[in-house]
Amino acid sequence: QQQVKQSPQSLIVQKGGISIINCAYENTAFDYFPWYQQFPGKGPALLIAIRPDVSEKKEGRFTISFNKSAKQFSLHIMDSQPGDSATYFCAANNFNKFYFGSGTKLNVKP
Amino acid sequence: NAGVTQTPKFQVLKTGQSMTLQCAQDMNHEYMSWYRQDPGMGLRLIHYSVGAGITDQGEVPNGYNVSRSTTEDFPLRLLSAAPSQTSVYFCASSRGGIETQYFGPGTRLLVL
């Protein structure tokens, strides 16, 4: 049973549009929620992360929205660019163990 | 800094063979971990270590062994390879559990 559920599986967005990826979890003991970006043939790289005591975190064009009561968090990519085309993973941490979502393949059309 | 390095980049094994995937980091990170990545499954934690001499199981530990004799190295051993272990393996390190994880470039393993 997957501890973190991610949707959609794939996403196509026009250049300049907003990309939104959603994740949900059940374990209320999770205390750290990172998002990773992965390009083909490379390892994942941390994009942005949030703790559950904060409802939103913004870094440049990337924003995490966190809803503790709903046990959901999402990544928003504003002004999406073709260079953002990659696979995105959400994750959650509980006592040194990370659980990843299944990934979203984002394709930003020029 | 080289960051996190993994060897080999690609390996083909026959069922029943054993091998060790190497992982090293030069950032003096205490936390190191191994993941496998399969299509549609995301990354799944195999084993992790919070410091030299300390290891623990992750989500999918069966068929794999680890040890951490130094801060820098965290090898992953496949005792008797099975086709189900065909995957891409990533090693990662960080200063602590809830810190930025730095991933290596991965090892692609094919078990025939």
Image (spheres, coloured by chain):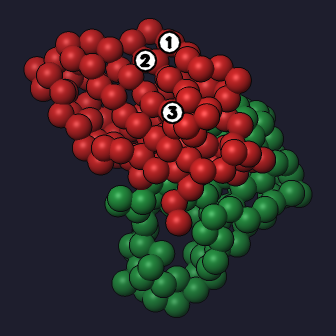
Chain colours: A red, B green
Label 2 sits on a secondary structure element that is strand
Q: Closer to the observer: label 1 or label 3?
A: 3
Task: Report how far apart the C-alphas of labels 1 and 3 lie in the structure.
Answer: 16 Å
Q: Nearer the viewer, residue B11 or A14?
A: A14
Q: In which quadrant of the rendered image does the C terminus of chain B lie? A: bottom left
User: Which amino acid type is shown beneath numbered disc 1?
Assistant: Glu
Residue A8, quarter of picture: top left
Q: Position of residue B84 (x, y in %)?
A: 44, 79
Residue B26, quarter of picture: top right
At horizontal 32% and vertical 14% (from top left) the residue drawn is: A78
Q: Nearer the viewer, residue B98 or B94?
A: B98
Q: Could you confirm whether marks 1 and 2 are on the same chain?
A: yes
The residue that label 2 is drawn on is A62
At horizontal 55% and vertical 16% (from top left) the residue drawn is: A57
Q: Could you confirm whether marks 1 and 3 are on the same chain?
A: yes
Is there a contact, CB below 8 Å, between mark 1 and mark 2?
yes
Residue located farthest toward the front when viewing the structure as drawn: A69
At horizontal 42% and vertical 52% (from top left) the residue drawn is: A102
Task: Using the image, name the chain to which the residue with label 3 belongs.
Answer: A
Task: Report how far apart the C-alphas of labels 2 and 3 lie in the structure.
Answer: 13 Å
Residue located farthest toward the bottom when viewing the structure as drawn: B16
Label 1 sits on a secondary structure element that is strand
The residue that label 3 is drawn on is A73
At horizontal 48% and vertical 84% (from top left) the residue drawn is: B82
Mark 3 crowdedness (10 Å alpha carbons): few <14, some 14-19, many ≥20 = many
User: Which amino acid type is shown beneath numbered disc 2?
Assistant: Phe
Task: Using the image, name the chain to which the residue with label 1 belongs.
Answer: A
Q: Position of residue A93 (x, y in %)?
A: 67, 44
Q: Along the polypeptide, which appears first: circle 1 or circle 3?
A: 1
- Left or right: residue A1 versus residue A41 is right
User: Which amino acid type is shown beneath numbered disc 3?
Assistant: Phe
The residue that label 1 is drawn on is A59
